[in-house]
Image (cartoon, rainbow, N blue to C red):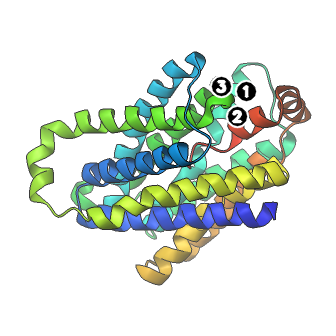
Amino acid sequence: MALLWALVTAIADAIAGVIIGKACKKSNPLAVSLIVTIGTLVFFLLVGLLGPGIHLEAKSLLYGILIGILFAVGNVIYYKALSIGPMGTVAVTMSLAPLVPIGFDVLTGKAPSPLQYAGFLLIAAGLLLVVMKRQGSIGATLGGVNPYLLAIPASLIYGIINILFELTDSASMLGLLLLIQISKLITTTLIALPTIKRIRSGSIPTLKLMPVGAIFGIAWIALDWSAKQGSIDITSAIEHSSPIFVAILAYIFLHERLTRNQTIGFILALSGIIFLVAFPASHHLASAAECGTECTHMHHHFSRMIR
């Protein structure tokens, strides 16, 4: 069942990503981010009211606000990349996110395992093939803006968020998620204020986007169940495979096509993700065991679920 729930997580995350990506092609990315955030906030609020209740530890207050701000900035950049670039290949660029917490481990004296080093190289080679055009030059699209030069910093922001999650209190998980959504909503609104007239003048598919928040919430719950029933390393590897489902859905519904080099790069990048999250060094496993089950869950599975 653990693998099944992890698969549900990856597919649900991919469905939400495709809906968001399609909406960003037709609507203002800032408006899309606002509506999705509201939908996610409503979902977690209902879960808290109907379920275990809502509480927040003081330790997580500052981190929750900071994570929400970073998520807002990361989403604005990422959604803009989705609005001007191919959805499938832009999604693969998110492969960079796991590099940040692992790089943080290196800076703090923890060496990656040999297979993680291989993962670094696979992701670098894969992303290079994905973002290169057939002619061999970096591709640019609308207005000369390169979508990958937007997606890369967005993925690094998501990676920083992974680190911050390790510093929060997992005992107040639902309250933390709600605080993050509130902080993200306020920050996105402030970012959107200078262009509010343009946002109002455009079409906003509110009814289609609001349920995306519930899809993200369902994906998070499925991942939580998977982590509790099986290996967190395998669960994380499957969850991080969601870009392949984004590419498949984009191929089916948006008729996006990958070149041969992009397909090879796609496979290399995904293989690198699996190497990074599924084959940690022994000290990583030990620290997770010392931290406890709930802490292990917290360290591995939030970065995608609350966008």
Residue 206's image quarter? Answer: bottom left
Is residue 216 something that shows in the picture? Answer: yes
Earlier sequence position, callout 1 versus callout 3: 1
Front: mark 3 or 2: 3
- Mark 1 → mark 3, Cα distance in angstroms: 20 Å
- What amino acid type should be assigned to the residue bearing mark 1? Asp
Q: Quadrant of the N terminus?
A: bottom right
Q: Residues within 10 Å of mark 2 (few under 14, many from 20)?
A: many
Disc 2 to disc 1: CB gap under 8 Å = yes
Is 219 above or below relative to 165? below
* Element type where label 1 sits in the image: helix
In this picture, residue 95 sits left or right of residue 157? right
Q: Look at mark 1 in the image and give the residue it sits on.
A: 105
Q: Position of residue 263 (x, y in %)?
A: 59, 72
* Element type where label 3 sits in the image: loop
Is 231 above or below relative to 169? below
Q: Residues within 10 Å of mark 1 (few under 14, many from 20)?
A: some
Is 47 above or below relative to 102? below
Q: Depth check: give the residue in front, 183 or 137.
A: 183
Q: Depth check: give the residue in front, 253 or 182.
A: 182
Q: Look at mark 3 in the image and give the residue it sits on.
A: 169
Q: Look at mark 2 in the image and give the residue it sits on.
A: 102
